[in-house]
Amino acid sequence: MIPVRFIPVFIGIIGFGTSLNDKCSNVVRNGNFEEGTKDWKFIGQNTGLLLISSDRIPRPKSKQPIPKQQEQKENERDSSIHHGSALSTAQRDQWYHGMSQELQIDCLTQNQYYEVSMNVMILDYAGKPVICDPFQYHFDPSTSTTCPTLALQLESKDNQLKSIPIGNPIGPWNPTEWNEVYGIFQATPFFFQQKRVEMYVTNAPVGHNEVIDNVIIKPISTSTVGLRTCSMELVKNGDAETKDARFWYLKGDASTYGTLEIILTSTPGSSNKSNNDSKEPFTNHAFYHYGNRKNKWNGMWQKLDQDCLGIGSKWKISLYIKILNKKREEIWCDTKKRACPEITFESITIRGTVTENLRNLIKKPWENLQNLVTKPWVQGEWNRFETEFTMTEAHKKLDETWFYVSNIEPGHGYIIDNISMVPIMY
Ligand SMILES: [Ca+2]
Ligand SMILES: [Ca+2]
């Protein structure tokens, strides 16, 4: 069993002046569990709720291997704010079983955008931390590496149920520390036609407990990461300065795409966001994708906001990149033989079954875009990549448009930063 400490409910804490603004500054009630399990329920007959002490959550022990050169692995996640209690399930018999809370719909404003965040871990029934894979975008309940997600269950007046994901797990996943679920959603008029809107934690593998803390749903603000800015920048978190890989996935499936971590480095064109000491050579963060990549197209993958991509609109994509061999040494590639990294755009429509989706994926339109910077590749330095993409009708008529890093030899890795996509003709 997990170490469990029951916390008494502090009745006195709800006595403060609770105007609607105060009450709704976090749409989630008792999101930090300072009032015990108050306002929380669960989905699944045997799920149950347990309060556990946040201090009992296991702390990190080991470090991952780092590239064989100057870069350092980023390993600083602030865990100092997590005190008091956290909420765990007691048992989970189905992937969709988890803790839940009915949302105060009168706290939501129609058409307003909301930022969602939550700290989360997975523990097995013996209380040991479990790793999951946040880079797999498509949820497959038959795999044992799915990560917890935050979703809304909407129940209509005629009892129809609809589920909407509102927060996705962020990689890289550290099993022995708090991880984050993050997202942005809009409170559409559809929400207000429902009989009930219930938020729930879902998608962790069956037979494991979800543990959560600091669940927040609040109106977006200037500090919200990943807001729509069609006219300025279409890539979300292209510079890794959130110190994580939020908004990024890996193309392929977990057995073929390797893994990704955040490293400290020094990329041209980066401001010293994370370190004010000018003597320190590692001033910013970058993505490092490596490991057992089986295909050239197993690359970092991000969904674009297709509403920003008008037919005929033209975009400039730019980034800095280094490539590494299996020994994690920086290597050279031959631009003349088309052996260097590229960027691929693709569009898909997801409908029906997994088999149908796979068939759709084969038929999708895609373009492999080469580097328009004709300078030869320089080993050991950051290489500049620039290309252009024009949105077409063939892309637009499908539901989703994505792009990914491609044409990297299987088994090789790359370090990438300052990935940007800005309009040339909009
Ligand atoms: Ca707490
Ligand atoms: Ca960066």
Image: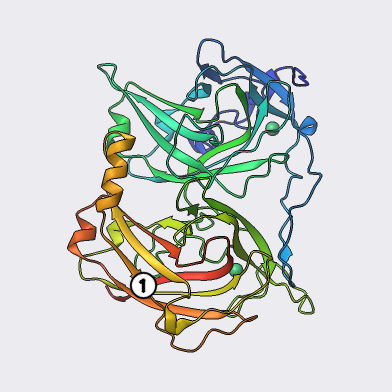
Which is more toward the observer, 147 or 423? 147
Q: Would you say residue 114 is visible in this rendering? A: no
Tally the marks.
1
Relative to 421, say whether 29 is above or below: above
Q: Percent from the top left, x then y, of residue 117? A: 55, 42
Q: Quadrant of ligand 2?
A: bottom right
> Residue at 71% across / 33% down in the picture?
129
Which is more toward the observer, 77 or 208? 208
Quarter of the image where the N terminus is located:
top right
In this rendering, position of residue 98 left or right of residue 347: right
> Residue at 31% across / 31% down in the picture?
192
Q: Percent from the top left, x then y, of residue 324? A: 62, 70
Q: Percent from the top left, x then y, of residue 73? A: 72, 61
Relative to 197, say whether 170 is above or below: below
Relative to 20, say whether 68 is above or below: below
> Residue at 37% across / 39% down in the picture?
109
Quarter of the image where the C terminus is located:
bottom left
Q: Amino acid at mark 1?
A: Leu
In this rendering, position of residue 228 left or right of residue 24: left
Q: Residue furthest bottom?
A: 375
Q: Quadrant of residue 194?
A: top left
Q: Would you say residue 278 is visible in this rendering? A: yes
> Residue at 32% across / 59% down in the picture?
346
Q: Identify residue for label 1.
A: 369
In this rendering, position of residue 352 left or right of residue 187: left
Which is more toward the observer, 167 or 400? 400
Q: Quadrant of residue 301?
A: bottom left
Q: Percent from the top left, x then y, of residue 369? A: 36, 72
Which is more toward the observer, 219 or 80? 80
Relative to 98, say whether 281 is above or below: below
Secondary structure under tag 1 reads strand
Residue count near mark 1 (Cα–Cα under 10 Å), binned few <14, some 14–19, many ≥20: some
